[in-house]
Amino acid sequence: MIAILTKYYYDILVGVGYTMLVAVIGTLVGLLIGILIGIYRTLPLPKNKFLRVLKRAGDYLLRAYIEVFRGTPMMVQAMVIFWGFALLNGGRTLNVTVSGLIIVSINTGAYMAEIVRGGIISIDKGQFEGCHAIGLTHSQTMFNVVMPQALRNILPSVTNEFIVNIKDTSVLNVIGFTELFFVAKDIVLDTFKTFETYLLAAIVYFILTFGISLLLRLVERKMDGNKNFRILGSQNLDAESFAREARSEK
């Protein structure tokens, strides 16, 4: 394994770089897709009949997208999208890196849509009612009150999806994408050391996923803020009353 790492370290680094590129961009774009779909699917039905029909039609189309991409393997999706583009363009294939980004982003978006929708639903309805009572529109309520809380609630699920994407980029080798697993296959063909090469690849995958997991857990703790805090009464207290209240809490 040390000999393989010493000889092929540059190729392995290239594979890691492409793996992380697709995983990071695919997760971020997928999260954006999920946020947009999640917000749309939680919109209240409009009173206008025509707009209501459009809203329901959009719901059905988005639900079909979610079910199709969650119900089929990413490897099959990669083959269909990559070779489907070639079929529609007279045999001219799409750039492999661009194909990988599109495939991972669309697949991730289907999962993120349900994650975001669940995060929005988890927010107490009283907050919606309170925002509407003070005159906020639905979009203002979503972006200023609901989504900041929902994003914090879904952060563990987003972290999990990111880690899954790091590992699932390996299926893109079926379209010739040069990620870590593809590089490992080339090394095996060159050295015939199957066990050592794939064990090394597994260790690299573990280091990547474990490191990302620790980093994002730290981000979660930072977003939680301080666990211990105290409120020193009304801001309208005079200085003497404020100091007396502070002493009483010690």
Image (tube, grey):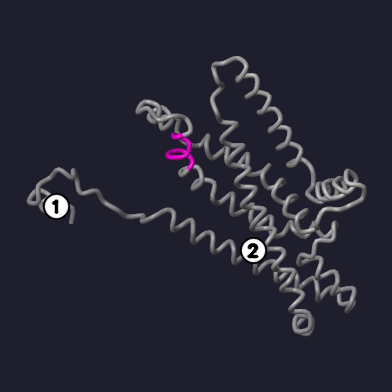
Question: Which quarter of the picture shows residue 34?
Answer: top right
Residue 239 picture location, percent across and down: 9, 51
Write the start and end of the magenta stretch as one range.
140-147
Question: Which quarter of the picture shows residue 234?
Answer: top left
Based on the picture, tell me whether residue 141 belongs to the magenta stretch.
yes
Quadrant occupied by the C terminus: bottom left
Q: Considering only vertical position in the picture, is 130 above or below 210?
A: above
SS state under label 1: helix
Residue 149 picture location, percent across and down: 46, 43
- In the current view of this chain or complex, which residue is farthest to the left? 240
Determine crowd level at label 2: few under 14, some 14-19, many 20+ residues with C-alpha closer than 10 A: many
Name the amino acid, label 1: Ser
Based on the picture, tell me whether residue 234 belongs to the magenta stretch.
no
Q: Give the main secondary structure of the magenta stretch.
A: helix
SS state under label 2: helix
Residue 81 picture location, percent across and down: 82, 47
Q: Considering only vertical position in the picture, is 230 above or below 138?
A: below
Q: Considering only vertical position in the picture, is 113 above or below 27?
A: above
Quadrant occupied by the N terminus: bottom right
Q: Residue at x 13, y 55 (%)?
A: 247
Determine crowd level at label 1: few under 14, some 14-19, many 20+ residues with C-alpha closer than 10 A: few
The residue that disc 1 covers is 248
Q: Considering only vertical position in the picture, is 219 above or below 200?
A: above
- Residue 162 lies left or right of residue 244; in this view the side is right
Q: Earlier in the sequence, mark 2 or mark 1?
A: 2
- Residue 176 lies left or right of residue 32; in this view the side is right
The residue that disc 2 covers is 209
Q: Which one is nearer the viewer's eye here, 154 or 103?
A: 103
Q: Residue at x 69, y 49 (%)?
A: 105
